[in-house]
Amino acid sequence: MIKTDVVIVGAGPVGLFAVHQLGIKGLKSEVIDNLDKAGGQCIELYPDKPIYDIAGIPECTGEELTQNLLEQIKPFNTNFHFNERVQEIKSENNTWIVKTSKDKVFSSPNIIIAGGVGSFEPRKLSVKNAEKYEGKNIFYSVSNKEKFKDKKISIFGGGDSALDWTLELSKISNVTLIHRRDKFRGAPHTLNEIKKLEKDGKVSIKTQYQLSSIEGDNSIKSINIKDDKGKEIAIETDYILSFFGLIMKLGPITDWGLNMDNKTIKVNTENFETNKKGIFAIGDICTYPGKLKLILSGFHEGALASVECFKRARPNEKYRFEFTTSSKDIQARLGVKTK
């Protein structure tokens, strides 16, 4: 069993800033996320799109914001548990026992739910045998592009992820981009660059086609795609990359007895605690009168929730608010050398 001051469910920007706010108060947190990396929506949905409403930062991308937040919390040596979902929680003696999908068990007086509008899961291919190749020849994200070097890649999708990876992998691979419509949703500039590559014979684009079958034994040998008129094409393929977006699911959270309101969780605005003592909700997952679904709002919510978390984790200590600019203790936790 892993004992900690706070279990944070969700490693998006709001969850990462909560780590910071807890850390400067001397609290240890463990972070659980259903995705394979930190960043949440910012990384999965718009890593390269500019964000304009972070205080003090005129413009940054989702990727840059995530990396900055990870850099900010480095001093706290936080443990992340990726590709895991919280399956069960139960209360024992004013402490929450949290069990994950990988059978890890945590003990903590506090749980902060910072899971956006639920946990994110890739929208998977539904053709026969697809599951057999997942994680081997079929992928829904790219963690190491070198894996695909000098291979035949079939990329499915019409959004930014599909276009961005088509452009990037075309530098090292033989890429076919397949989309069920003529029109793409991604950035026009990226699409124009891909069309230039198509003219040069470096990329193949197939529109109004969908995956109909996969051929192969232990690994994929080829795929068949079909258009609306029944015309079918076979394409030699080593790997399939599918970018059909994410499915947002609340999952087991709906069974925790929380005060739900249209797939969000009602909280108070004093400390963003739910109707369950010691369970807090911050970011897009929470609701209250006047709620704005902005990252900066989530930062504020996390800061206030961290105060109540301190009181529950350190019941025999008096909470004393201090500015980071003047507190030697806080600066020491951040690794700042003081005179």
Image (tube, rainbow, N blue to C red):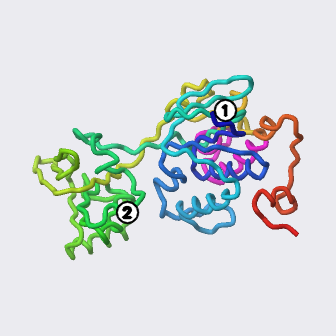
The residue shown at (23%, 61%) is: 152
Main SS type for the magenta part? helix
- Label 1: which secondary element: strand
- Please give left or right for residue 282 compared with residue 153 in the image: right
Q: Mark 2 points at which residue?
A: 145
Can you give x and y, in whole percent of width and height, for residue 4 in the image? 69, 39
Q: Determine the image quadrant of residue 239.
A: bottom left
Q: Mark 1 points at which residue?
A: 107
Front-most of 182 and 175? 175
Q: How many labels does the image show?
A: 2
Q: Determine the image quadrant of residue 153.
A: bottom left
Q: Do the residues labelled 2 and 1 touch (CB within 8 Å)?
A: no
Task: Judge the density around disc 1: few (<14), some (14-19), many (≥20) Cα neighbours within 10 Å.
Answer: many
The amino acid type found where label 1 is placed reads Ser
The amino acid type found where label 2 is placed reads Lys
Image height of 308 relative to 139, above or below: above
Does residue 283 belong to the magenta stretch? yes
Can you give x and y, in whole percent of width and height, for residue 203 in the image? 24, 68
- Quarter occupied by the N terminus: top right
- Please give left or right for residue 206 compared with residue 9 in the image: left
Image height of 167 relative to 275, above or below: below
Q: What stretch is highlighted in magenta?
A: 282-307
- Please give left or right for residue 92 compared with residue 181 in the image: right
The residue shown at (59%, 32%) is: 105
The residue shown at (74%, 26%) is: 94
- Rounded to the nearest angstrom, the CA distance separating label 2 from label 1 is 38 Å
Image height of 107 relative to 44, above or below: above
Task: Judge the density around disc 2: few (<14), some (14-19), many (≥20) Cα neighbours within 10 Å.
Answer: few
Does residue 97 belong to the magenta stretch? no
Can you give x and y, in whole percent of width and height, for residue 55 in the image? 68, 62
